[in-house]
Image: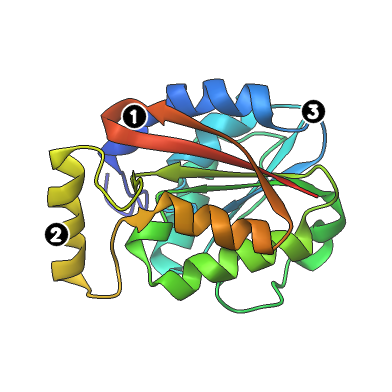
């Protein structure tokens, strides 16, 4: 369609149902979920109506992706989906406008490996600052465990990421957990997901 600003990520269609199954179980029953690095916006429009009465607050740094999120919202409006906000996870403190007091959870899908390590550090520090006690941080994506890739496809993906940008790459899960714990985020569980990805769940203490 001419003028359609919606972008599409094929992985969203494959992973959204398994992610939803986890989110339904681990998210607090009330409040607003801040999605950091919402990308195209496809996850936001899928999750928001299915996770009500929680509200969903998408965010991104990329102006084109912010427009894509708005375009998806125009096609799939929901009373439980807020307009997207511009958020640079690395730039602290986060400017969340009037939403900060509502936030009970943070969801971040496929960001830590497609960004410099400092952005992931910002995410964990921001979660410490924003989440209330017992608030949830949910991460999804590929990780190395004990310094080793969990599948040959992840090793190939890691090489392609580092070729695109030497600061990118699949992270060691243990490193993420160690930094999270230093920011008062207790590791609750790690779940195997489709396509050799993991769901990693933390709770603010």
Q: In terms of image quadrants, where is residue 165?
A: bottom left
Badge nearest the viewer, 2 or 3: 2
Left or right: 174, with 11 as reference point: right
* Rendering quarter of residue 180: bottom right
Position of residue 181 measured from the top left corner of the image (x, y, whole percent): 65, 56
Q: Which residue is mark 3?
A: 29
Residue 7 appears left or right of 48: left
The local crowd at label 3, few if under 14, some if 14 to 19, many if 20 or more residues have their Cα within 10 Å, is: few
Residue highlighted by disc 2: 160
SS class of the residue under badge 3? Answer: loop
Q: Earlier in the sequence, mark 2 or mark 3?
A: 3
Q: Residue at x 40, y 28 (%)?
A: 192
Q: Position of residue 95 (x, y in %)?
A: 72, 72
> CB under 8 Å between callouts 2 and 3?
no
The nearer-to-camera label among 2 and 1 is 2
Disc 1 to disc 3, C-alpha distance:
25 Å
Q: Which of the two labelled residues, at mark 1 and mark 3, occupies the earlier sequence position?
A: 1
Of circles 1 and 3, the one toward us is 3
Residue 22 seen: yes
Q: Residue at x 64, y 53 (%)?
A: 83
Question: Residue at left 84%, top 50%?
Answer: 102
First-in-chain label (2 vs 1): 1
């Amino acid at each position: 369609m001419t003028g359609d600003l919606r972008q599409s990520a094929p992985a969203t269609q494959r992973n959204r149902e398994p992610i939803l199954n986890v989110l339904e179980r681990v998210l607090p029953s009330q409040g607003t979920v801040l999605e950091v690095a919402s990308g195209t916006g496809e996850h936001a429009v899928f999750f928001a109506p299915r996770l009500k009465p929680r509200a969903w607050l998408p965010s991104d740094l990329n102006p084109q992706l912010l427009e894509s999120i708005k375009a998806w919202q125009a096609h799939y409006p929901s009373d439980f989906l807020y307009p997207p906000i511009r958020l640079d996870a690395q730039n602290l403190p986060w400017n969340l406008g009037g939403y900060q007091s509502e936030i009970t959870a943070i969801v971040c899908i496929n960001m830590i490996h497609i960004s410099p390590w400092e952005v992931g550090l910002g995410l964990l520090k921001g979660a410490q600052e924003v989440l209330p006690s017992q608030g949830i941080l949910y991460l999804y994506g590929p990780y190395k465990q004990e310094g080793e890739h969990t599948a040959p496809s992840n090793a190939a993906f890691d090489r392609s990421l580092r070729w695109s940008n030497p600061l990118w790459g699949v992270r060691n899960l243990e490193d993420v957990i160690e930094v999270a714990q230093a920011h008062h985020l207790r590791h609750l569980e790690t779940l195997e997901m489709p396509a050799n990805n993991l769901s990693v769940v933390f709770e603010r203490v």
